[in-house]
Image (cartoon, rainbow, N blue to C red):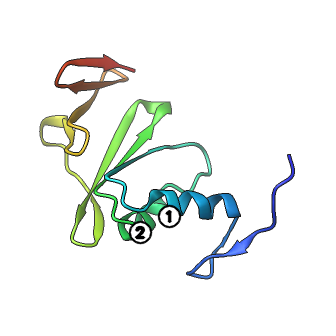
Amino acid sequence: MERGPAARGPAGDRHRPALARHRRRSRGRRSVVEIRSPGDETYEKIEFYAAAGVRELLVVHPDDRRAEVFRAVGSRLLPVQAPGGVLGLETLRVELRTTAGALHLTWDDGSAQV
């Protein structure tokens, strides 16, 4: 697959036009889910998501079945501590916890384990 030419972003970073389209679509989102993979740029995008007005960011680590939540505090997305091992996503009304190598999700009408 041939990729288009790289372009310079507002911070001088190099990115592909597809990423620029992704950035425009992210504006005003209440929540974003990032699925981690080796060598990805999840943590480099946190400031971008905060500037775009994202209220919560869920970072899923599929290899070890765990998750992190970042929540907007002022103009920044900061990591949420998990009291009792339970993380809450306020925007989606979902609770997450990891036990025995599984990620458990609970919401108003149900639950799932992955």
Q: Residue at x 57, y 80 (%)?
A: 10
Tell me if mark 1 has few (under 14), some (14-19) or many (20+) residues whose alpha carbon lies within 10 angstroms of its own: few
- Image height of 109 relative to 27, above or below: above
Q: Which mark is residue 47?
A: 2
Is residue 13 left or right of 48 when viewed as pictured? right
Q: Position of residue 112 (x, y in %)?
A: 31, 18
- Residue 44's label in the rendered image is 1
Question: What is the secondary structure assignment of the residue under circle 1?
Answer: helix
- The residue at the point 42 percent across, 39 percent down is 60
**Position of 78 relative to 11 (above/below):** above
| Quadrant hosting residue 96 | top left
Cβ–Cβ under 8 Å for marks 1 and 2: yes
- Location of the N terminus (image quadrant): top right
Coordinates of residue 55 in the picture (x, y in percent): 28, 57
Name the amino acid type tagged 2.
Glu
Task: Nearest to the eye among marks 1 and 2: give it.
Answer: 2
Looking at the picture, does residue 22 appear above or below residue 32? below
Q: Which residue is at 45% across, 67% downward? A: 48
In-image side of 26 versus 90 (left or right): right
- Front residue of 9 and 113: 9
Q: CA distance from mark 1 to mark 2?
A: 7 Å
- Residue 113, how many percent across, how many down? 34, 18
